[in-house]
Image (spheres, grey):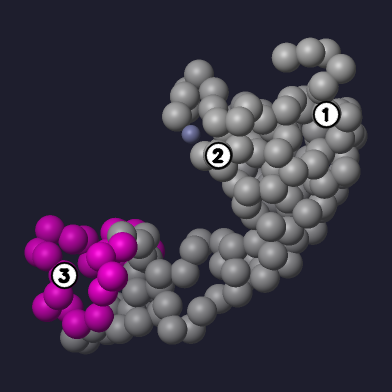
Amino acid sequence: MAEGSRPTQVADNVVVTIDYTLTVDGEVLDSSEEEGPLEYLQGYQNIIPGLERELAGMKVGGSKNVTVAPEDGYGVLDQEAIMDVPLSEFPEEVPLEEGFELEVTDKDGDIMLAKIVEMGETTVKLDTNHPLAGKTLHFEVKVVDLRPATDEEQTHGHVHSEDHPH
Ligand code: ZN
């Protein structure tokens, strides 16, 4: 790749490397200090919409504090995603106690993560919302590197790396 074709700012079809810290309710939940920098493809909803939008136009070395409302993050809390399931539907080996997380299959056959939020006499209250649904997210982000996406990456809509070659 020719030096002159390196992108100068975050834009669609650019592979962006960022350092980030995610804080929710005053608690650091995720950070590139532990996970390593995040590489993603801008313009393909690889990351949550509220963050992708704020990163657009940033240059290498630039940093920013971004607050993302639930609607632009992991969604608002969906009351319909909290459901009562008869005890009889759980296999015996599932430890039924509040806070336990398990995988459930919905009517379309999709696997979702569910958390037991309450134990009833004959039912279990399950919450299948994303754990960060309804939460306001605070990101500290810094753009570390930018490079053009390959044709294949643009076709696939994600970054290829040594860890994820396809
Ligand atoms: Zn691919």
The answer to whether residue 18 is magenta is no
Residue span colored magenta? 85-110
Using the numbered discs, state the Cα–Cα distance from disc 2 to disc 3 in whole angstroms: 42 Å
Element type at mark 1 = loop
Q: Residue at x 10, y 64 (%)?
A: 92
Specify which label sits upstream in the sequence, 2 or 3.
Answer: 3
Between residues 34 and 163, which one lies in front from this camera angle? 163
Quadrant where the image shows the N terminus: top right
Where is residue 129 shown, x and y percent of the image?
47, 69
Dividing the picture into quadrants, the one containing residue 74 is: bottom right
Q: Which residue is mark 3?
A: 90
Specify which label sits upstream in the sequence, 3 or 1.
Answer: 1
Q: Residue at x 62, y 42 (%)?
A: 30
**The residue at label 2 has a CB less than 8 Å from ligand 1:** yes
Dot 3 surroundings within 10 Å: few (below 14), some, or many (20 or more)? some
Q: Amino acid at mark 2?
A: Thr
Query: Magenta span: helix, strand or loop, mainly?
Result: loop
Element type at mark 2 = helix
Picture disc at residue 7? 1
Residue furthest to the top in view is: 2
Picture disc at residue 155? 2
